[in-house]
Image (cartoon, rainbow, N blue to C red):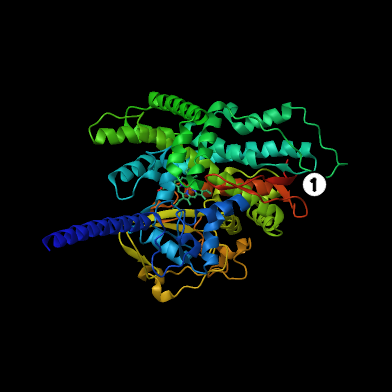
Amino acid sequence: MERLVKSALEESSLLLKVAVVVIAAGLLFAAVRQRLYPQPLPWLPYNQEAKGRLFGDLPSLMSWHKKYGEQRKWYQAQCLKLNSPMVQVFLHPFDGKPSILLCDHREIRDILMKRYKEFDRGNREQNAFGALLPQQFLSIQTPTPKFKFHKELMKDLMLPGFLNDVNAPEIYRKSIALLDLWKAKTIIANGRPFDVKWDIHKAAFDIIMAVSFGLKDEDSCTIKQLRATLAEDNPRASRQVDLNEPYKFSSLAMDPEGQAVLDLTESISVGFSSPIPYIHSWILLHMPPLRNAVQVKEQMTRRQIDGAVAKLPPTDEEAQRNAKTGLEYLIFRERASARKSGREPNYHSRYIYDELFGYLIGGHDTTSNSLAWGLMYLADIEGPQKKLRSKLKEAFPEAAREKRQLTLDEITKANVPYLEAVNEEILRFSVVIPVVSRKAVCDTTILGHAIPKGTEVEFVFNGPGFLKPQLPVNNELRSETSKLSKIRDWARDDVDQFLPERWLDTDHNGNEVFDALKGPMMTFGGGPRGCYGKRLAYMEMRIILALLVWNFEFLPMKSQRRPFGLLENITVEPSECLIKIKTLIQ
Ligand code: HEM
């Protein structure tokens, strides 16, 4: 009997052990599954097929990329597909947490501008830029002393004094060089279109190099290109051949430093398309071609800094008064900050190198691609270009009568609401950075849904509400500040059309006025982490646009080949920018 009991006890304890192991394994499996597989938040729509996949929505995003050659329209397509202004997606392999996509313009604006204490800079940008620019303020969280320090370091570069006294004349001078280049090319092309994408890009690059470091004419890419185009024996195109056939001009190679900046700028694009952005970028930057580009960039920055330090006047007042370039301001701010905190200035610190490079990157790719898209809209969409030219003639009657070039003073002082409206509509329509992110820094809610701390929220600027009809939202679910918003929806029937008039109003004296708050447009993001360079971008686009439309007529290419293909790098850029030009002012 005793033996029987003993053996039963042994058996049951074995069973118990097996049971414990099975339960533990089951729990472990459930925990791993919970961690690795998508775990949707309740009540928020998601793609059902993503739930059972370790890779969540990634396969869908990848097949979209394969089909359309881009990823950034996929985000808005999910809100449309699930018919909801807010959905959840799973884009990080082996991470069960969702990212939220938000397509409602009112809520987006409210979160970026009013609820920024609940939502800080997200992983998307940090992952994309962090490997190349770990010490640029884009990669730094907002409520930190470090962020404040970086903003202080960079603050002079967007102040009206520097913008008006240094940036505007440089923008004007470099734009005149671009006009000269296109006038020369137009004579050679003799009525045929040519691709101006790289010309615009190089002009924007000249501008940002000039305002960052100062740029002599002989180092300007546009002037070098003009000289090369004139020196090359480019035969004048025959009028007998197809006038729609693009004339192919050769593009002068950039010097090694310029090329290094462009290569490194382009390398950031993997940070926006790779499922493992930071690691992917880091590996690329340590492979020979980009490793070399990093070295060239470091040497260039060192040389420029040494030059600026050598010229730095002894007193801060003098240094501030005499500063003529972005770098000179940065150096002066570093010395002032060091003096204040009783330390030695560190002109070769990582943060100065990274802020300078961030300024170079932010300052040319965005503006040049917005302009390239804008030129194609103006060429092909009947109406706005002609109307803008006639508004410019009304604003500058003397220059029109004398058939002469506009001066910088005329452009900067004039009040031409239609010019602002065209500029704004180009920015709304081209939206070269269509998705930006924030991360919830506490448990919170959006449109009545609980959003756990740490959740990544992607704000989508190229879909419903901005370029497509708004998706319905129950207003009761909005935050209190969002309920107070006065921004109205665009009309459903013309939201997808290029219509500068949408930005115009009439004041109480019956005058036409530009109103930037007429409707939703978030091309620069918003709030404390909105675009740092917005003022420079507006100034640059306005001056270039006025000069281009004054000097040239851009002829439509509707019936011809206009692929409207795009490339995704840091920004969404046209694959080419074919323009047929007629010169109006010699
Ligand atoms: C048409 C031109 C431009 C467009 C469309 C554009 C767009 C944007 C967008 C969408 C963001 C993210 C905003 C957010 O997260 O809320 C951003 C951030 C930024 N932009 Fe721009 N940008 C332009 C021009 C410039 C220029 C000219 C510069 C500098 C010279 C610049 C420097 C920056 C920097 C440093 C940030 C990061 C700000 C931060 O993290 O606090 N951008 N820009």
User: Is residue 113 found left or right of 409 in the rendered image?
Assistant: left
Query: Residue placed at 49% from the left, 65% from the top?
Result: 48
Report the residue at 50% width, 62% height from top. Answer: 49
**Res 157 visible:** no
Q: Nearer the viewer, residue 6 or 305?
A: 6
Near-viewer residue (54 or 67): 54
Q: Position of residue 289 (x, y in %)?
A: 52, 29
Q: Position of residue 314 (x, y in %)?
A: 32, 27
Q: Residues within 10 Å of mark 1 (few under 14, many from 20)?
A: some
Res 145 quadrant in image? top left
Numbered disc total: 1
**Position in image of residue 147 (x %, y %):** 33, 45
Quadrant housing the C terminus: top right
Establish whether ligand 1 lies closer than 8 Å to the Cβ of label 1: no
Indicate the quadrant containing the N terminus: top left, top right, bottom left or bottom right: bottom left
In the image, taking residue 514 as reference, residue 247 lies left or right, namely right
Q: Is residue 16 visible?
A: yes
Q: Amino acid at mark 1?
A: Asn
Q: Quadrant of residue 506?
A: bottom right
Q: Is residue 188 left or right of residue 265?
A: right
Q: Nearer the viewer, residue 302 or 55?
A: 55
**Residue annotated with mark 1:** 244
Q: Position of residue 578 (x, y in %)?
A: 70, 45
Dot 1 falls on a residue whose secondary structure is loop
In the displayed image of the protein, which residue is found farthest to the right? 240
Return the residue found at the far front. Answer: 1
Is 134 located above or below residue 17 in the figure? Answer: above
